[in-house]
């Protein structure tokens, strides 16, 4: 995939934001329109005055980001780009938005290990041990949470628990994971082949031809869930993925719903049984008051078709006590 310039190269096109673009403590810059800027710093949102940031400047910035990708905001008003430094930019221009809106998510400067998260009080040690036992037992883990809740941070930490001598195939919309495994191949969606976009589902299917011991999907959003569940249930245990959800139980339903989006989807009850067979442990992360923490952990025991309820319980390493929400602010 082609990449636009790094965050620093945006400075000439976003007057008044020079300090923010160079501040490593700012994780996200949200431009709602001319002069309307919000930033996330240490997990908290705060407004920023930017009177010099006019509609004309925002239009120039959108063109500057889109041009290296071979795109034109006038022809394609909704754009997603990855910058050279790994940061992500989302752009929406008229007529899809009244004003040019730009959101910049800076690529994290530090990767946290599982032990780091425990030390920070972000991940209860018993939940870590349950996740470790699950992965080493060649069973699979689903990480759920909302936008910006820390799903990728936790996923990165869990990947480090996988054996170094086993092969990982990682699939992402945008390359964000930091994987140090010596035997890892990485795929990124969005590349083009004869002007046909390569989708996550294409890459999940293709991954099976690269002899993975473990499959990591950065985030499941749609029909690729059906192919992932097939892979998880046919000899690729110890795999990981994330999904947007409000809580751990709803994450299972969301995964099944995504699988149902596939054109060749199986019936709902069959799909739910596939989720039960494919996912052993759900870890749900949340963000409150600017802090990120592991809120819940559930071991998946089954699906009751008569009531439509998932059968779950606390993981083995945590039985006897409820997980206490802990904080993390990576």
Image (spheres, rainbow, N blue to C red):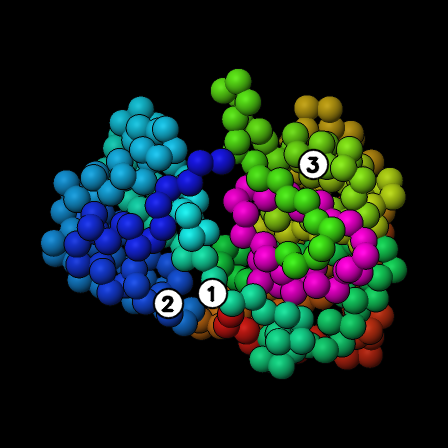
Q: Residue at x 87, y 60 (%)?
A: 137
Say if the magenta span includes residue 122: no
The disc placed on residue 204 is 3
Dot 2: element? loop
Q: Residue at x 72, y 32 (%)?
A: 205
Task: Provide the residue designation for mark 1.
Answer: 109
- Residue 170 x, y percent position in the rendering: 67, 46
Q: Quadrant of residue 124?
A: bottom right
Which comes before the other along the chain, label 1 or label 3?
Answer: 1
Which comes before the other along the chain, label 3 or label 2?
Answer: 2
- Residue 178 x, y percent position in the rendering: 59, 57
Say if the magenta span includes residue 158: yes
- Report the span colored magenta: 152-178
- Residue 317 x, y percent position in the rendering: 82, 73
* CB within 8 Å, label 1 to label 2: yes
Furthest toward the top, the residue is: 194
Task: Provide the residue designation for mark 2.
Answer: 24
């Amino acid at each position: 995939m082609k990449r636009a310039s790094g965050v620093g190269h945006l400075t000439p096109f976003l007057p008044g934001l020079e300090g923010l673009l160079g501040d490593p403590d700012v994780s996200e810059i949200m431009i709602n329109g001319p002069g309307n800027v919000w930033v996330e710093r240490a997990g908290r949102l705060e407004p920023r005055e930017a009177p010099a940031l006019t509609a004309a400047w925002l239009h120039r910035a959108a063109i500057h980001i889109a041009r290296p990708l071979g795109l034109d905001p006038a022809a394609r008003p909704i754009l997603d780009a990855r910058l050279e430094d790994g940061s992500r930019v989302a752009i929406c221009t008229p007529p899809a938005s009244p004003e040019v809106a730009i959101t910049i998510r800076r690529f994290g400067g530090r990767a946290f290990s599982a032990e780091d998260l425990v030390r920070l009080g972000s991940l209860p040690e018993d939940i870590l041990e349950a996740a470790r036992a699950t992965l080493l037992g060649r069973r699979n883990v689903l990480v759920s949470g909302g936008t910006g809740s820390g799903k990728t941070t936790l996923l990165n930490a869990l990947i480090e628990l996988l054996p170094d001598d086993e092969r990982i195939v990682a699939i992402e919309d945008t390359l964000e994971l930091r994987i140090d495994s010596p035997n890892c191949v990485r795929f990124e969606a969005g590349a083009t082949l004869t002007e046909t976009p390569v989708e996550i589902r294409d890459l999940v299917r293709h991954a099976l031809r690269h002899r993975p011991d473990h499959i990591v999907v950065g985030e499941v959003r749609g029909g690729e869930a059906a192919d992932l569940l097939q892979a998880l249930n046919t000899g690729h245990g110890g795999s990981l993925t994330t999904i947007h959800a409000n809580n751990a139980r709803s994450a299972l339903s969301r995964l099944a719903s995504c699988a149902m989006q596939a054109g060749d989807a199986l019936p709902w009850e069959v799909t739910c049984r596939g989720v039960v067979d494919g996912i052993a442990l759900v870890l749900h992360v949340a963000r409150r008051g600017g802090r990120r923490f592991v809120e819940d952990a559930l071991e998946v025991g089954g699906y009751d078709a008569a009531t439509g309820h998932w059968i779950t319980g606390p993981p083995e390493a945590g039985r006897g006590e409820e997980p206490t929400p802990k904080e993390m602010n990576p």
